[in-house]
Image (spheres, coloured by chain):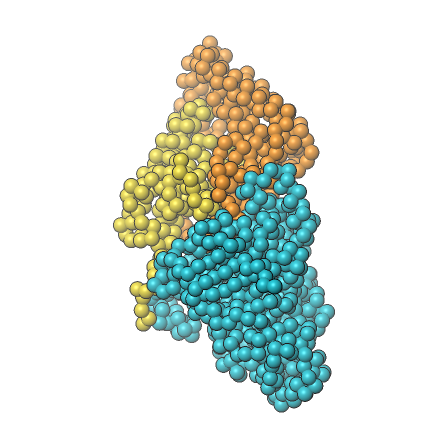
Amino acid sequence: MEKETIISFENFGFQYTAQAEPTLYDINLQIHKGEKILIAGPSGCGKSTLAHCINGLVPNSYPGKTTGALTIGGKNALELGLFGLSKIVGTVLQDSDSQFIGLTVAEDIAFALENDCVPTGEMHQQVERIAELVDVKQVLGHAPHEISGGQKQRVGLGGVMVSDVDVLLFDEPLANLDPATGKQAIVLIDEIQKRTGCAVIIIEHRLEDVLYRPVDRVVLMGDGRIVYDGSPDDLLCQNLLQERGIREPLYVTALKYAGVALTPEMRPSFLPELKLSEDQKAQVFAWFARQPAVKPTPNPEVLLRAEDIDFTYEGGHHALRGINAVIHKGEMLSIVGTNGAGKSTFSKVICGFEKPQSGILELNGQDLGALSIKERADHIGYVMQNPNQMISKTQIYDEVALGLRNRGVPEEEIRPRVEQTLKICGLYPFRNWPVSALSYGQKKRVTIASILVLKPEMILLDEPTAGQDLKHYTEIMDFLSELNRQGVTVVLITHDMHLMLEYTPRAIVFHAGKVIADMSAAQVLNSPEIVEAAHLKETSLYHLAGLCGISDPEEFTRRFIARDREVRV
Amino acid sequence: MTNLFNYIDRPSPIHRLTGACKLVCLITWSLAAMTSFYTPLLCVLTVAALILFRVARLRLKDISFMVGIMLVYILMNNVLIFLFSPTHGTTLYGTQTVLFRIAGPYVVTAEQLFYHFNVILKNACTIPIVLLFVCTTNPSEFAASLNRIGVSYRVSYAVALALRYIPDIQREFRDISLAQQARGTEMSKKASLVSRLKAASSILIPLILSSMERIETISNAMELRGFGKGKKRTWYSGRRFSKLDLLAMAVCVGLMLLSLALTYFNGGRYYNPFV
Amino acid sequence: MKKFSVKTIVAIGIGAALFFVLGRFVAIPSPVPNTSISVQYGLLAFLSVVYGPVAGALVGFIGHTLIDFSYGWGIWWSWVIASAVFGLLMGLSAKVLKMDEADMGKKGLIKFNLAQVVCHLICWFAVAPVLDVYMMGEPWDKLLAQGLMAGVANAVTTAIVGSLLCVAYAATKTKAGSLTKE
């Protein structure tokens, strides 16, 4: 029996009023009740616009011209309008701090009910029920900053489920979560769907993470069109994902490198059920044996040394407990761990933003304790996650020159230094542009340039690639690797396991204010206890290595990464 | 929430009053204290305010910070008044009873002292009530209460949003300011005033512009969950008026009417013991 | 009264939160010992120009009330109202003078600053003292001196902070189409 269709696009197209070209062309898409769909695609492919069409933000908040037909719940979406659609489609936005509108968890879940004028008594009962469903009952009276990122997302989900919607739409649900919490979010979405029978639409470019639980269909978008609409297994057997700039699951890429011919019957979309024949396993093993061994990098001299750093915030939160760590000259290093594990606090201590109660911090053997924030910045540069929070000048040139001008460097010396830095960062052609004309990735470069111009020995970046698709991610990371090759020590604070594996030979893992591991990135991800404690996620390569009888999964991971970088460059 | 507004959750009759009731009481009480210069009434209000403070089971150490600021403020205000208008009392009350002379125009008169006494009383009877409101009303109830007393729910919700996002903006401000300091932005006394203001702007510009970008996302999130569709909305933290609420509001409205009556029917605004 | 759009409501809420944070936590040391200069009026002037008079008035009113609440020195309605009036007047003058926040050239900045000086004058020299004289029965001389200090300080901060904000905001509105790489 054909399932009931809840969303139907027919020859649908859309053009924003402010733009010269349509953003969506010829969209034909049916979504049925109870289906689970992943919509993937690189930035700018139109996937967000498609989502906005489904929840009514297009054309209500973002005006434009539609062609063709969009029927949701049997009615014309344009006639339903934003409020009509909000009864059918519940949207959980990417930015969980903007999604969380209420002063407390309970009020946020109740928000939609309040707008529907549900009487207060009844509202309290419904909020209880939903809170139980998404498991936030213990924190009903808490404010948004008192709960974890994962809980915030549960609240966001609760806040839309309270309206008994038929469709749940998630806009990049994994973007702000650490790997383990992201995994839990995917499990939760799966459970909720099974329990309520809602249709679920997940917009995400982190394909492998979404596929942690099976999806019914993947819709792949590119340049405003649907380029693929079908089962995930079929999709993974083709090369469409790479062509469109979406990262395949790592084990799939590894199988392809090994020359294994994938077929949908092997179930490549769901790792626990992946079927490999003995021949195929041998093929992977042989490929592994063929790849050259990866040489460990020699141990260089120490740049920064932290000894027994202890730090407690004013409110009494003991954030760092006896931290010992070393950063070498010229290395590229990841600092990982959950939110609140101490990694951000540690970076603040390094930059002098916070003063530790005890411990020693040395740079090139010299004590940093007496240096002010500004003086430390001559040696250690800090780049914030969101470039918009760093940029205070309107012109690129002025922004990059700011630090030098503040240090009283004469203007004739500033110009060559700024221009040279702009050249390194690939921004020289834009030097006379206003910052606002740049893309997000370019702005990120401006902020890095504004730090580099001070010639620090080390730069510290907070989540440099958060929310970026594969193309922009590669762009930013290759740029940082290039800087690293030129001798700058690069330290990354990150949630992204792949970034850590791919670009940083060494990782320091924080957990509950302590360093629980300091080893190679591949080693970290192949140690189940560390992965578990620090909310990381072991890579699927580990699983694949086991499946193929490879006894050294770390080395397998290293060789895969080395090969993958050659292929992608 | 971070206790910016010093809400102290402790069972007491005052805590049990609904936010809307307390808001009405706060407004009428302030009006009563503001309009009146009728000293006996101000005395009664002051004593009553202090008694209510006990009833709310607030302790001095809960609010020592706020009381400190308040005392400094009252002192400064009185010093300023005396410096600029040492004979204001004489003008008001029409007599001059010199107690002693300091120098030049600075004379201490009984009238001036009585005037200062009244100004302090006016502060003393309103400030505790504001503190009482702040300390005993859950911020979650602010918006519901405003809506209850007739403010449109949209404007009421703007207040709720302000309370919701103050901690976020505060945190962002701190982060941005540290990153700017690392780049050499200086706001200390070493720099000139204008360059200090320019330095401040280099922190404020990213803070404000990125907050403005957020406005769009938040309004989308709100509309997607049906905010603004109806003429009315209900509130999770809204509560019905109890008998005690009605009584409290009646007393406060009564006080306000009394104060107005005394001002208009008692032959002038100022209670004058000098004639 | 016309219904506010949801976006305006959010702008008022976030604006008031910003006003609060700036007024409460951003203190720039001033030349007078133990006093500091607050920068929130630069923000208020700017937001009023962008979001209009009613939004400006509400940002000033809500933001200032919350600051008074958090200090616990009572609510100084006269000054709260003066803040609200400043937002209102700035928003109105932006309409009357046809200020275009997306295009803040020299002319725009002159208009902005003329307007803000006049509005500050009205608020701190007329609105606040008149209300104080009535409500608190305080002497004129003292109130005028206070108003003078507040008005001048606020006008100076608005001139610098507000103008820089306007310029920065206008710059975000530039479109890439007009630019070429060199």
**Which of these two is toward me, B249 or B192?**
B249
Q: Chain B is drawn in which colour?
A: orange
Residue A119, quarter of picture: top right
**On screen, B85 above or below A67?**
above
In the image, is A34 to the left or to the right of A389? right
**Residue plotted at (45% across, 15% down):** B264
Question: Can you say which quadrant of the picture contains the N terminus of chain A?
Answer: bottom right
**On screen, C1 above or below A333?**
above
**Which of these two is toward me, B260 or A485?**
B260
**On screen, A530 above or below A105?**
below
**Residue plotted at (29% across, 49% down):** C108
**Residue plotted at (52% across, 21% down):** B256
Residue A406 % position (x, y): 42, 60
Q: Which residue is most to the front?
A: A1
Q: The yellow chain is which one?
A: C
In the image, is A345 to the left or to the right of B212? right
Residue A17 % position (x, y): 36, 57
Q: Chain A is drawn in which colour?
A: cyan
In the image, is A415 to the left or to the right of A509? left
Whether residue B251 can be seen here: yes
Residue A190 % position (x, y): 64, 61
**On screen, B71 above or below A98?**
above
Residue A237 % position (x, y): 57, 78
**Which of these two is toward me, A470 or A226?**
A226
